[in-house]
Image (cartoon, helix red, strand yellow):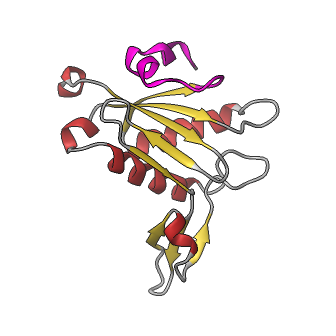
Amino acid sequence: MIRSLLPKTPLYIQIWKDRLRVRNPRSLKAFDDKPIVGLDESKGKNVISAIGATAESTPCRKVYPFGHPRLIIHEFLVAERLMRYAFFSVTSGWFFRLSITAVVHVMEPPEDGPSDIEVRALREMCVVAGAREVHIWSGRVLTDAELLSGVFRGAA
């Protein structure tokens, strides 16, 4: 009930195999980094020790959640944690995190487009990361004005 009263916060998520960009067109904050997650396995658990370019130089196991040659998401759980971190980086305060609308744009889609299961995985990843609403966008890059006006709402 309260969520429906909150202003929607659109986040534009652009996914490449070697880059993740999450932009908030309201605040103009952006997370733009390599999609690498460093995991520390020293205590028998996978604990995130570094994210992005920092993970490259950290002594840890490196996971590339979008780095599969045929699939959009290679490591779902790691991709979900990375997305949650990116959402947190571009939104300020818990109040605005309750109303995130994610617009996901896969910049290097598979030749035949994403499969139904990949679309479902992208949606699930964003919902678990904190999005209330998820739209999958294909085509040209959206501007901040288009994101704020909601032109993506006709997308799948």
Question: At which x and y percent is residue 57?
Answer: 55, 77
Question: In the picture shown, does residue 146 fall above or below 106?
Answer: above
The residue sitting at 56% across, 39% down in the picture is: 14
User: Residue 32's x, y, as percent?
Assistant: 49, 49
Extreme residue in the right direction = 111
In the figure, 82 relative to 135: above or below? below
Residue 142 lies in magenta, yes or no? yes
Where are the magenta residues, as a range?
137-155
Residue 64, image x and y in percent? 63, 61
Rendered view: 99 above or below 33: above
- What residue is drawn where x is 72% and y is 33%? 115
Residue 111 x, y percent position in the rendering:
82, 34
Q: Does the magenta stretch include residue 11?
A: no
Q: Say left or right for 104 vs 85.
A: right
- Number of numbered discs present? 0
Q: Is residue 55 left or right of residue 111?
A: left
> Where 4 sits versus 119, above or below?
above
Q: In which quarter of the image is the N terminus?
A: top left
Give the quarter of the image for residue 62: bottom right
**Residue 140 appears left or right of 69:** left
Q: In this view, does 124 lie to the left or right of 7?
A: right
Task: Tell me the quarter of the picture where residue 130 sits.
Answer: top left
Rendered residue at 48%/15% (across/down): 153
Of residues 112 and 11, the one nearer the viewer is 11
Quarter of the image containing the C terminus? top right
